[in-house]
Amino acid sequence: MSVVTPEIRFFADCHWLMADNIILLRITPMLPYEWSNLRRLFDCKSTFETRSGPFDYWRIRLEFDGNLIHWTVSDGWWHPKTTTFDTDYETTMRILFETGYDLWRKDNGIMDDTDKAIKLLNDSGIPAMRSSDSDCLIFEVREQTFRALIPDNPTHTASLLADAAGKRGEIIAGYRKAVAGLKRTEVEENDETAWDELFSTGGPVEIGDISFGFHAADGMLVGLDLLIMSDGTWRPDGFDPDVKGTAGDVRDYLAQWVEEQS
């Protein structure tokens, strides 16, 4: 018996689970309890049958055999036409209860906090979607793909991420302007910003750094790195963990540090 791959198609104003051009399940009009009952049957691998149409014209029987689902589709009253085929259990579960369930929620206007976070990110120009792992979300910033744990308040952290990613260039430009004219000073963007950490924790992450150096009295070149964070603040790299500031006071901090090192 052939193993076919199920797919979801949209026609007649509904989403349908189909395989080999045969309709298996009508997704859009399902009620919440129908989804939960269906998931329970698939999880338990329980043999069951669905019927629809006048006089149960359309019947579909599902039987589970290891990693396969055996489908028997009967179409008709007196002498029904019967079609049988198999689908892979894991593939069917993924298509039906991930892709299909997401489409069902959208069709019925049902959005949880993760859905709202995904919409917020997409509307902000950050492509995002659910991961195959229900605890994670996948999104893309500047052609870099991240997989992040979903926090307790995903819409809040999504707004922080969207704001920080959108303002990164502006923040870096502000620091370059603030330290303009200082010798041996460079302000660079961080090409490997941990946006996934920001989304998972809501805390600021490094988006760039200021590299500063000067010659001390003994002629040695002394250097200092300040990390530029996604919330617009700076903090010393590797020491003084309680010290931080903004672009407006970074020159004063560097001047004080030079004085202390001289």
Image (cartoon, rainbow, N blue to C red):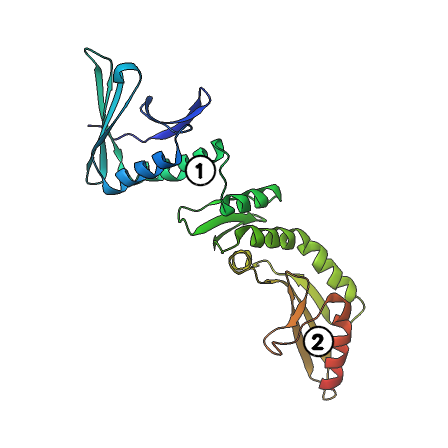
Where's residue 94, x and y in %? 35, 40
Where's residue 243, x and y in %? 66, 76
Where's residue 234, x and y in %? 67, 68
Camera sees residue 179: no
Of badges 1 and 2, the one in the foreground is 1
In the image, residue 198 sits, relative to residue 141, either above or below, namely below
Residue labelled with disc 2: 213
Q: Residue 258 is drawn in which quadrant?
A: bottom right
How far apart marks 1 and 2 lie (CA) works out to 53 Å
Q: Residue 31 is drawn in which quadrant?
A: top left
- The quarter of the image holding the C terminus is bottom right
- The quarter of the image holding the N terminus is top left
Side of 38 relative to 218 (left or right)? left
Which amino acid, mark 2? Answer: Gly
- Mark closer to the chain start, 1 or 2: 1
Side of 20 relative to 198 (left or right)? left
Q: Residue 73 is drawn in which quadrant?
A: top left
Residue labelled with disc 1: 102
Picture residue at 50% right of the left edge, 40% below the top: 111
In the image, residue 164 sits, relative to residue 62, either above or below, namely below
The residue furthest right is: 181
> Who is closer to the viewer here, 52 or 87?
52
Picture residue at 46% right of the left edge, 36% below the top: 105
Picture residue at 63% right of the left edge, 53% below the top: 165
Where's residue 65, x and y in %? 18, 37
Q: Residues within 10 Å of mark 2 (few under 14, many from 20)?
A: some
For label 1, the SS is: helix
For label 2, the SS is: strand
